[in-house]
Image: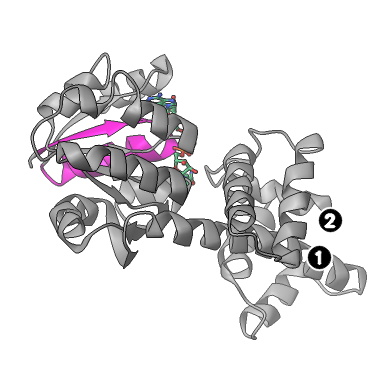
C-alpha cells in the first residue's frame, strides 16, 4: 500500500497529502476547486481529473471533505469506488462527519471488499502539515490495523474508540464540548473583565485551577486574546459540527438542555458572524 489518494485538498487535506509524501508514499490527489488543485500540484502532489483514477490506482484513499453529504456523494455516487476499485481498497475518512452516514456507507462498501475506517482529526492545518494530528478512530480491529501505516504518517496520537462510526461519534462529542467551552469561557472572561480582572491574568488563574479546558489553555492564548483569529478552522465548519451533534442528540431522542442551548447559540450566530470567520470569533458574542 505505497500509493495513497487524497480527496479534498483544502486546509486539512493539502497538509495531509504533504505529510504522506514526506513519509515516502506516492500521493495522488483530487479536488474540484482549481485553487486547491494548483496549490497541491505546486507541492508535488500528482493531481487527477476525477476520483475514479484514485480508486483504481491507490491501495488506500484518505478523505478530507466538508460535510457528510459530500462524503456520501463521493463514496456512493456514480464516480465512487463501487464502480471500479483496486481489490481490498481501504478508505480512511478524516472528515468530521455523521456516524449514521459513515455506518451506512461502510455497509454499502463491505460486500465489495472495501474497508472504511473513520479517523476524524484535531490539530488544525498546522497539525495536518506537521503530521502531529490527534485521531479518534472507528473501524474493525482488522481494518484499523491495515490503516495503521497511513494513520501513523498523519498523526502523533491515535485512539481507537470502537467499531466503524465510533470515531465520528467521539469527534462530534469533542467538538460539541469545544463549542460549548468557547461560549462559557467567553462568559467567564466577560464577567471577570467587567469585575476588574485583566483577561490574561484571569486565564493564568483559571489554567492553574479546575475550570481550565482546551479553550482556556490553547484557544484564548493562541487565537483570541492577541486578536489573531487565524486557526484555519471556520465558523461554517464548526456550525456544521454542532449541527451534526444536535442531529445525533435528536436521533437518540435525548434531552440534553445545556448542549441544546449551546447548539442554538451557534446556529443563531450565523446572523452576526460570517461563515468564513475563524471559529473562535464566537467569543465576540460576549467580548468585543
Ligand atoms: P476546506 O473547506 O478547507 O477543504 C475541503 C475541500 O474539499 C475543499 O478544497 C473543497 O474544494 C473540497 N471538496 C468539496 N467537495 C468535494 C468533492 N465532491 N470531491 C473532492 N473534494 C471536494 O475544509 P478543511 O478545513 O480542510 O476541513 C476538511 C474536513 O476536516 C471537514 O470535515 C472539517 O470539519 C474537518 N476538520 C477541519 C479542521 C480545521 O482546523 N480546518 C480541524 C479538524 C477537522
Q: Is residue 268 above or below residue 180?
A: above
Q: Residue at x 73, y 58 (%)?
A: 260
In terms of depth relative to the viewer, which is nearer, 165 or 282?
165
Label 2 CB-ligand 1 distance < 8 A: no
Q: Is residue 98 above or below residue 35?
A: below
Rendering coords of residue 204 (x, y %): 66, 77
Task: Provide the residue span drawn in magenta.
Answer: 3-24
| Residue 44 can be seen, yes or no | no
- Check if mark 1's residue and mark 2's residue have beta carbons within 8 Å: yes
Rendering coords of residue 245 (x, y %): 59, 53
Q: Which residue is mark 2?
A: 286
Q: Residue at x 57, y 41 (%)?
A: 237
The 10 Å Cα crowd at callout 1, few under 14, some 14 to 19, many 20 or more, is: some
Q: Residue at x 37, y 30 (%)?
A: 8
| Residue 163 located left or right of residue 81 | right
Would you identify the image quadrant in which residue 137 lies? bottom left
Q: CA distance from mark 1 to mark 2?
A: 6 Å
| Residue 263 located left or right of residue 88 | right
Q: Secondary structure at mark 1?
A: helix
Q: Residue at x 65, y 64 (%)?
A: 254
Would you identify the image quadrant in which residue 259 lies? bottom right
Q: Secondary structure at mark 2?
A: loop
Rendering coords of residue 203 (x, y %): 69, 73
Tell me the tag on residue 187: 1
Residue 16 colored magenta?
yes
Would you identify the image quadrant in which residue 113 lies? top left
Q: Is residue 279 above or below residue 73?
A: below
In terms of depth relative to the viewer, which is nearer, 27 or 102?
102
Rendering coords of residue 52 (x, y %): 22, 20
First in sequence, mark 1 or 2: give its number.
1
Residue 210 colored magenta?
no
The image quadrant where one finds ligand 1 is top left
Amino acid at each position: 500500500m505505497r500509493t495513497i489518494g487524497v480527496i479534498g485538498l483544502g486546509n486539512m487535506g493539502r497538509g495531509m497529502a504533504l505529510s504522506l509524501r514526506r513519509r515516502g508514499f506516492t500521493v495522488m490527489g483530487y479536488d474540484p476547486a482549481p485553487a486547491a488543485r494548483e496549490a497541491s500540484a505546486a507541492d508535488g502532489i500528482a493531481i487527477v481529473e476525477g476520483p475514479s483514477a484514485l480508486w483504481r490506482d491507490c491501495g488506500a484513499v484518505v478523505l478530507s471533505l466538508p460535510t457528510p453529504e459530500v462524503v456520501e456523494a463521493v463514496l456512493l455516487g456514480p464516480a465512487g469506488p463501487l464502480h471500479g476499485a483496486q481489490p481490498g481498497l481501504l478508505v480512511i475518512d478524516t472528515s468530521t462527519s455523521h456516524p449514521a452516514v459513515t455506518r451506512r456507507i461502510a455497509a454499502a462498501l463491505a460486500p465489495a471488499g472495501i474497508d472504511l475506517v473513520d479517523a476524524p482529526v484535531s490539530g488544525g492545518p498546522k497539525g495536518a502539515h506537521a503530521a502531529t494530528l490527534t485521531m479518534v478512530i472507528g473501524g474493525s480491529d482488522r481494518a484499523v490495523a491495515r490503516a495503521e501505516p497511513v494513520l501513523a504518517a498523519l498523526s502523533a496520537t491515535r485512539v481507537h474508540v470502537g467499531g466503524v462510526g465510533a470515531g465520528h461519534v467521539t469527534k462530534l462529542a469533542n467538538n460539541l464540548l469545544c463549542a460549548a467551552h468557547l461560549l462559557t469561557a467567553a462568559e467567564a472572561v466577560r464577567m471577570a473583565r467587567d469585575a476588574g480582572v485583566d483577561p490574561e491574568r484571569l486565564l493564568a488563574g483559571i489554567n492553574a485551577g479546575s475550570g481550565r479546558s482546551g479553550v482556556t489553555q490553547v484557544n484564548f492564548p493562541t487565537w483570541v486574546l492577541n486578536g489573531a483569529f487565524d486557526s484555519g478552522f471556520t465558523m461554517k465548519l464548526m456550525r456544521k459540527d454542532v449541527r451534526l451533534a444536535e442531529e445525533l442528540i435528536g436521533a437518540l431522542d435525548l434531552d440534553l438542555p445545556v448542549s441544546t442551548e449551546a447548539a442554538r447559540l451557534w446556529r443563531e450566530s450565523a446572523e452576526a458572524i460570517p461563515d468564513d470567520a475563524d471559529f473562535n470569533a464566537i467569543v465576540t458574542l460576549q467580548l468585543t
